[in-house]
Image (cartoon, helix red, strand yellow):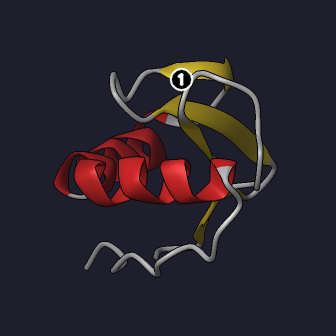
Amino acid sequence: FYGIIIKMFFQDHSPAHFHAEYQEFEALFDINTLEIIKGHFPPRARSMVTEWAALHKNELNEDWDRAQKPETLFKIEPLK
C-alpha cells in the first residue's frame, strides 16, 4: 500500500515485530506497542503503518506465532 512493503521473517528474533520498507527507509515495528524498535520511517509513512497495524494487530500476532514454528503465514489485507 502506497509503496510501503511489510515483511515478516520465519523464526526471527523477539520481540514480536514486522519489517516495513518505504523508499530508502526501513524500520522494525513492535506488533504489540506499534513503536519502532529499530530503524527510521518518515512521519507520514509511519502513521500509515501504525494505523494499518492497529487494525490488524491480532492477525499480525497470529502470523508471528506461525512464523516461529515455522508455518505458512496468512495474507493480511493492505491499508486502503
Q: Quadrant of the C terminus?
A: bottom left
Residue 17 lies left or right of residue 56; in this view the side is right
Residue 33 lies, with reference to residue 8, above or below; the image says above
* Residue at (74% x, 42% y) in the render: 26
Image spot of residue 34 (x, y percent): 37, 29
Residue 55 lies, with reference to residue 31, above or below; the image says below
| Along the viewing direction, whichever of 42 and 71 lies nearer the viewer | 71
Residue 74 lies, with reference to residue 11, above or below; the image says below
* Residue at (39% x, 47% y) in the render: 61
Label 1 element class: strand
Image spot of residue 4 (x, y percent): 57, 65
Residue farthest along the front direction in this orientation: 69
* Residue at (39% x, 44% y) in the render: 44
* Residue at (46% x, 76% y) in the render: 1
- Circle 1 packing at 10 Å, graded few (<14), some (14-19), many (20+), is some
The kind of residue tagged 1 is Ile
Residue farthest along the left direction in this orientation: 55
Q: Which residue is mark 1?
A: 36
Residue 46 lies left or right of residue 13; in this view the side is left
Image spot of residue 40 (x, y percent): 66, 27
Residue 38 lies, with reference to residue 61, above or below; the image says above
Image spot of residue 19 (x, y percent): 66, 47
| Along the viewing direction, whichever of 65 and 8 lies nearer the viewer | 65
| Along the viewing direction, whichever of 33 and 21 lies nearer the viewer | 33
